[in-house]
Amino acid sequence: MTQMVRPRGLVIAVDGPAGAGKSTAAQAMAAMLGLLYLDTGAMYRALALKALRRDVDVCDGAALAALLADTAIVLQRTDDGRSQVLLDGDEVSAQLRSPEINATVAEVARHRAVREEMVRRQRTLAVAGGVVMDGRDIGTHVLPDADLKFYLTASLDARARRRQADLAQLGYTVRFEQLREEILQRDFVDAGRPHHPLQQAADAIVIDTTSQEVSRVVEQMVARCRQRLAR
Ligand code: CDP
């Protein structure tokens, strides 16, 4: 009897620092290619939110790991194509982008036990393929065998300006200089942490988004994916 072997769907990794435009571009690309968009930063943000709510010390890795073991985080797409995050069943997407979470999340993500469990969950989500996964360590550690890897970057000022606009949309007014400082600090923690820091994979396609419209960035990414699919 012949067995049908279904090839795994395309697996795409998108990494880069805060505000480089990863999530906007990755989400648009996933929609154009009919792939599922998975925002791993949202998983760390969800744990940070729960820790703040429960008053769990974000410097205590063991306490955070215990909290995570008892936490359900679901990434899903609504019927109209938006990404949503459910934390223990409640929709928390907007709350995950608050200045408090921005200031706390990198500390939460620094702990080895937290990262190991998050990576385990992320690999499970990607097992069937057909995904675009966005984060800091996707191409280097979570999905090193991804079919395509992108690394998005942009100048610090461009990143701070974008973040200011994102926050304004959510109703937060934050000074540009303060955001610039916070992003620098988060880059510093992300790039310097001992367990799988922010790094560019050797085989990543690097795109500097500083002076490019999102649509142009997405176009380049989709074109690369189509080339890959045609092989
Ligand atoms: O949207 P933005 O680029 O600001 O951040 P994010 O992708 O939501 O990630 C928030 C934080 O989670 C990062 O600054 C990292 O500290 C952490 N993170 C991580 O450690 N590993 C990932 N794969 C994704 C996010």
Image (spheres, rainbow, N blue to C red):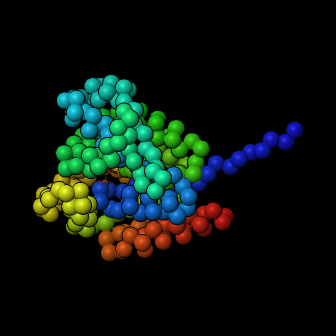
The answer to whether 93 is drawn above or below residue 152 in the figure is above
Which quadrant of the figure has residue 68?
A: top left
Q: Seen in the image, is 99 located left or right of residue 126? A: left
**Residue in view at x 35 percent, y 46 percent:** 42
Residue found at x 33% / y 62%: 20
Query: Residue 36 in the image: x percent, y percent?
Result: 51, 52
Which quadrant: the C terminus? bottom right
Q: Is residue 141 visible?
A: no
Picture coordinates of residue 28 (x, y %)? 45, 63
Examine the rendered structure and indicate whether residue 225 appears above or below residue 107.
below
Q: Residue at 41% across / 67% down in the picture?
A: 207
Q: Quadrant of the N terminus?
A: top right
Displayed quadrant of residue 45: top left
Residue situated in front as seen by the camera: 26 or 155: 26
Give the x, y percent position of residue 88: 36, 33
Q: In the rendered view, would you say 102 is above or below 58?
A: below
In the image as oriented, which residue stretches furthest toward the front? 79
